[in-house]
Each structure stands twice: as structure tokens, then as C-alpha cells.
Image (cartoon, rainbow, N blue to C red):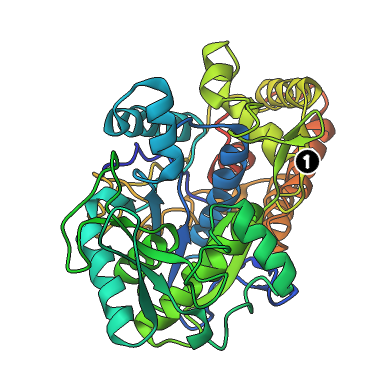
């Protein structure tokens, strides 16, 4: 599956630091990349493409884009994998409700998502993988877990058997979210699970393979005719494209449980690695009028609709970065209006002429296998020495270092934005080019001032 075009990444002098990033299970901020590795690897759960892309999605992918940019600025190569859950219950339900073929719906909304990510300046993943592309691999993973005694079968309503993971075989289950058994059961039921199904060995056991049901898509497999369960798909994609251990598993806070807890359990079973992921990082939820923005509530603000209405995507990105990525926050017209004023002030104070800026080429290893070129990948462009940088004035250099330090402390984009505001205000009416600051804004914050 192809992703979207790679944004321009200016070169900066020197290098930033590897950010620390908060892990809920650890209860503290941890280094986001292993110190003895030249490559940083990240898996971020992608969309279920039945109504994309709302601002909650955008906030998540922008936050992890900032992390990727900070890694590149620190001199690390980056390998980034992301899924598209292009067959799942919510997608099928929406397709049935609207009379649209589920495949057409998935393709249409994935196209919208690609366009939105490109507009928002998000660096594309190296591996952008649709679940329908790897169904045989997911079935093989389920068969491997069953063979290892980590899964069991239940008779399905329309014949055949469903395959469930046996969580009792994983003594580390629960260490990702650190929730009580009661809280886990409640969330499992709310978020697509079936804790009350008769015959299951444990109420939290998740489905690995769903046997064929009437009116649903299915594939032939060693497990019988059917389709994948939800959590195992991410484990398979991460294991295939990143290997274990990898550095960061990311997503919205609503994925902490059950999705990240269970996909990590599957990874342990499939790879025999006790710690397949170093850090699990989660973004806060975006609300509207005090309620979580979600498809089920129908209170979505869509990126595509804002852009179609004339809103600059850079202002949307800036508005979402103005809040702490880990905190739940509300979207409001005033937030966007503030971002639009800030963007206009930055562009007025920092004109586009940028001598010394270097356009980075494609990743040195060529395009990723699935992204069609220009993924997050093996690129050291950001952080390369910039010709002429030693002569740059002190205020510019200090501002770049303030931005870098802010991002290194758990992706503190509000502090990074404040550093730029301070530089702009200090210039007064001086509108001469400040190429180092302009390049840093684009390279580290993903805001292009010359658009």
C-alpha cells in the first residue's frame, strides 16, 4: 500500500538530543530510542478507514511525526511502520449502513487520510500496510500461537471455529496498562471485546481469527475460512517490518487498553521476547464541547473539511501542537484562530528567502517496500551540518537550541512554540531573513513558512 509524498526537511547545524517520552506502564518518561542503536524504530497504529481524518487522528500522527523529526535531528535513522485496518467490524457496519462496498469505502477513506497527512506535513511511514495485504501472515501467526499452546478454538455460530488467545499463558499480561481486572473487563466490553461469550477460558481473551459469518468477507487459511482479529494484526506488522525489540509503540490513549496491551502480549508469544517494545507512548484525546471526538458520537471535526473551507493546514497543525500531546483537550474555534494569528505573525517576521537551506534527498536505502518512495526512513538529512551556520547570529542559534531542548523533554511542543514566539517578538519590525530559525520551524515542528 502506498503512503503519501515526503515533506521537505531542511538541514540544521549540529544535532539535538534523543527525546524522553512518557510510558504509562513505567509511570515515567523514558528514552525514546536505545542509546546503542543507530536506528530508531516506531510502530503507530493507523486508521480504520470508514470516516477519516478527524482532529483526534491528526493530533496523534502529528505528535509522533514530531518524535520522528527529533530522532532525525539527533542523527538517528528511522524505520516507521503503520497499519490500515481495512477490514474490521466498524468498517463493515458503516458499509452496510450506507450501501457502499466495504472495499470501496476503505479505499476512499484511506485516500482522504493520505491527502490529509500530506497536507499536514507528516513524514510518511516506510511501511504503510493494509491488513487485507497480509491476511495469510496473520493466519499463520494465529496457527503458530495455537501450536505453542497459547491459543484455543471455540465453535462459531455459522460453522467453523474462532481462535482466541489464552491470556492465562502470559504472566506479563496487564503490565502495559497496569489497570485493575475490573477496569480491564469494562474497557474490553466497551472497545470491541466479548467478555461475556460462553466457552471462553478467560473473559479478556481476544479473538485472533474470526470464522466466516454470513455476509462478511472471508479468506481461506490454515485456520479455516474467516478473517483476522484486531490486535494480532499490529503484532504481525511490527514483527515483520521492525523486528523486536523496537523502540516505540504509539497511538491514542484509547488504544492503551485493550489494543496495546493485547498486541504486546501477542508479540511476546510470537517472538519469545519478554520485552518486545521499549516504550509505549499515547496521545490525549481531542474533545468537542466537552465530549471525546469520535465517530460513534458523530461529533467529528474533519481535517479535509477544514481545508476545503479554506483553513491553512499549517494552522491546524500549529493549533494541535499548542497543547501538550499527552493531555486530553478540547477543540474550539478560538484555538484555531490563535494558531492562524500566530502563523501569520511568524510568516510576516520570517520571510521565505532562506540562503543555505539544503533540500534532503530520498532515503539512502531507496523507497520503503510499501510506501512508494520517500518514507520516514533511513535519512540523516535533518541534523547535517549547514554551510554558513557558524556565522548565524546568536539569537537564532539560541532559539533553535530552545526548540530542541523542549522537544527532548517529552515532546514539549508548547514550549517550542513559545521559543519561536519569543524570537519573533524580539525582532520587533525587523523582517530580514532568519534562515536558521525558519529551517528549524520546518524541520522540527513541520511548519513551512514559505507556503
Which residue is nearer to you in this view: 246 or 17?
246
Q: Locate residue 377 relative to residue 295 in the image: left or right.
A: left
**Percent from the top left, x then y, of residue 14?**
55, 61
The x and y percentages for residue 121 are 49, 36
Q: Name the residue under label 1.
A: 329
> Which image quadrant for residue 326?
bottom right
Q: Which residue occupies 73% across, 47% down? A: 416
Q: Is residue 218 left or right of residue 336?
A: left
Rendered image quadrant of residue 224: bottom left
Which residue occupies the foreground of this view, 396 or 318? Answer: 318
Q: Which residue is drawn at 41% across and 21% down?
A: 98
At numbered mark 1, what does the secondary structure look like: helix, strand or loop? strand
How many marks on residues?
1
Say which quarter of the image contains residue 209. Answer: bottom left
For the point 57% across and 44% down, the residue is 62
Which residue is situated farthest in the top direction here?
Answer: 309
Residue 120 on image: x %, y %: 52, 33
What is the x, y in percent for residue 78?
Answer: 42, 62
Residue 412 lies, with reference to residue 435, above or below; the image says: below
The answer to whether 22 appears left or right of 13 in the picture is right
Q: Which of 48 and 383 is in front in this view?
A: 48
Res. 404 visible in picture? yes
Residue 316 vertical position relative to residue 439 in the rendered view, above or below? above
Residue at horizontal 47%, vertical 44%? 10
Q: Can residue 15 be seen in this view?
A: no
In the depicted structure, whether residue 102 falls above or below residue 323 = above
Q: Quadrant of the N terminus?
A: top left
Q: Badge 1: how crowded within 10 Å, few (<14), some, or many (20+)?
A: some
Amino acid at each position: 500500500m502506498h503512503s503519501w509524498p515526503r515533506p521537505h526537511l531542511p538541514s540544521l547545524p549540529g544535532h539535538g538530543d534523543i527525546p524522553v517520552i512518557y510510558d504509562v506502564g513505567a509511570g515515567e518518561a523514558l528514552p525514546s530510542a536505545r542509546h546503542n542503536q543507530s536506528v530508531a524504530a516506531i510502530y503507530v497504529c493507523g486508521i480504520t478507514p470508514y470516516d477519516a481524518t478527524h482532529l483526534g487522528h491528526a493530533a496523534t500522527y502529528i505528535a509522533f511525526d514530531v518524535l520522528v523529526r527529533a530522532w532525525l535531528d539527533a542523527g538517528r535513522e528511522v524505520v516507521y511502520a503503520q497499519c490500515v485496518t481495512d477490514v474490521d467490524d466498524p468498517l463493515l457496519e458503516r458499509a452496510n449502513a450506507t450501501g457502499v462496498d466495504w472495499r470501496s469505502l476503505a479505499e476512499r477513506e484511506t485516500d482522504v487520510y493520505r491527502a490529509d497527512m500530506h497536507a499536514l506535513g507528516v513524514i510518511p511511514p516506510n511501511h504503510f500496510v493494509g491488513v487485507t495485504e497480509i491476511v495469510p501472515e496473520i493466519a499463520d501467526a494465529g496457527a503458530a500461537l495455537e501450536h505453542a499452546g497459547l491459543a484455543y478454538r471455540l465453535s462459531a455460530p455459522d460453522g467453523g471455529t474462532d481462535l482466541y488467545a489464552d491470556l492465562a499463558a502470559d504472566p506479563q499480561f496487564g503490565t502495559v496498562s497496569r489497570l485493575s481486572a475490573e477496569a480491564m473487563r469494562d474497557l474490553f466490553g466497551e472497545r470491541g471485546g466479548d467478555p461475556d461469550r460462553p466457552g471462553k477460558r478467560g473473559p479478556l481473551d481476544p479473538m485472533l481469527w474470526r470464522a466466516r459469518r454470513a455476509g462478511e468477507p472471508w479468506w481461506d487459511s490454515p485456520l479455516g475460512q474467516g478473517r483476522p482479529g484486531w490486535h494480532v494484526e499490529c503484532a504481525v506488522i511490527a514483527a515483520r517490518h521492525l523486528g523486536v525489540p523496537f523502540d516505540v509503540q504509539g497511538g491514542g490513549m484509547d488504544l492503551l487498553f485493550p489494543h496495546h496491551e493485547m498486541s504486546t502480549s501477542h508479540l511476546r508469544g510470537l517472538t519469545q521476547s519478554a520485552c518486545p517494545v521499549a516504550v509505549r507512548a499515547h496521545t490525549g484525546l481531542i474533545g468537542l464541547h466537552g465530549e471525546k471526538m469520535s465517530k460513534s458520537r458523530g461529533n467529528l471535526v474533519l481535517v479535509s473539511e477544514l481545508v476545503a473551507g479554506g483553513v491553512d493546514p499549517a494552522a491546524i497543525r500549529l493549533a494541535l501542537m499548542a497543547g501538550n500531546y499527552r493531555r486530553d483537550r478540547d477543540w474550539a474555534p478560538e484555538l484555531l484562530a490563535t494558531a492562524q494569528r500566530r502563523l501569520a505573525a511568524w510568516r510576516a517576521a520570517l520571510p521565505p528567502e532562506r540562503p543555505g537551506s539544503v533540500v534532503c534527498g530520498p532515503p539512502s536505502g531507496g523507497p520503503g517496500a510499501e510506501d512508494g518512495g520517500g518514507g520516514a526512513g533511513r535519512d540523516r538529512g535533518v541534523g547535517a551540518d549547514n554551510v554558513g551556520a557558524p556565522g548565524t547570529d546568536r539569537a537564532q542559534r539560541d532559539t533553535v537550541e530552545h526548540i530542541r531542548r523542549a522537544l527532548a523533554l517529552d515532546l514539549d511542543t508548547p514550549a517550542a512554540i513559545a521559543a519561536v514566539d519569543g524570537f519573533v517578538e524580539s525582532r520587533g519590525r525587523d523582517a530580514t531573513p532568519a534562515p536558521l530559525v525558519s529551517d528549524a520551524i520546518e524541520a522540527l515542528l513541520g511548519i513551512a513558512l514559505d507556503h
